[in-house]
Image (spheres, rainbow, N blue to C red):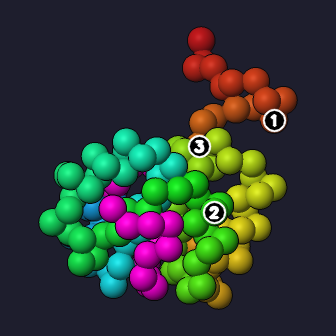
Amino acid sequence: MNSCCPPPVEARANWHGARPAAHLAAHHQPAQVVAVDASPAQCAMATDLYGHLASRLHIASCDAVSHLQTMTHAYDVLYSAFDAADFTGSRELRPTAAAALRPGGRLVFSTLAHHLTGSPAQPAS
């Protein structure tokens, strides 16, 4: 498992679980993929499952904002699969993510569905 500041990367991936990040590292072969998770248990499991990809996949055990604030290199892509975008304050996450992206880079995330009022979305009856 790597600290919060792994080596420079050209592709940045995943704030929730390492499975999608491992897929990118194994099948799309960017220069580097970083999986960030605040849970030491999740990072340990990811290291056990995907340690064979260590030359392309780095596991960082910290929260997304802290990770992005400590990196000195820009990322091509940042993505959050359900976690950081929902559980980190967007006023903190979005500007930090924007500062961490290279010009033309992309922030991609999936999120819980909510109405503008903040109430959870409900399936159509």
Specify the amino acid type for callout 2: Ser
Q: Please give the label number shown on residue 66.
A: 2
Residue range highlighted in magenta: 1-20
Give the mark nearer the N terminus: 1 vs 2: 2
Q: Residue at x 68, y 47 (%)?
A: 88
- Kindly state the secondary structure of the residue where label 3 is placed: loop
- Return the mark for residue 111: 3
What is the chief secondary structure element of the magenta stretch? loop
Callout 2: SS: helix
**Residue 91 image position (x, y, % from top left):** 81, 55
Where, by quadrant of the figure, is residue 69 drawn? bottom right
Question: Disc 1 versus disc 3: distance between alpha carbons?
Answer: 14 Å
- Expressed as whole percent of the image width and height from the top left, the position of residue 112 reads 60, 36
Q: Neighbour class for label 1 at 10 Å: few (<14), some, many (≥20)?
A: few
Residue 113 visible? The answer is yes
Q: Nearer the viewer, mark 2 or mark 3?
A: 2
User: Residues under labels 2 and 3: Cα distance?
Assistant: 20 Å
Residue ranking furthest to the right: 117
The residue nearer to you, when weighing 89 against 44, is: 44
Furthest residue in direction left, as rendered: 52
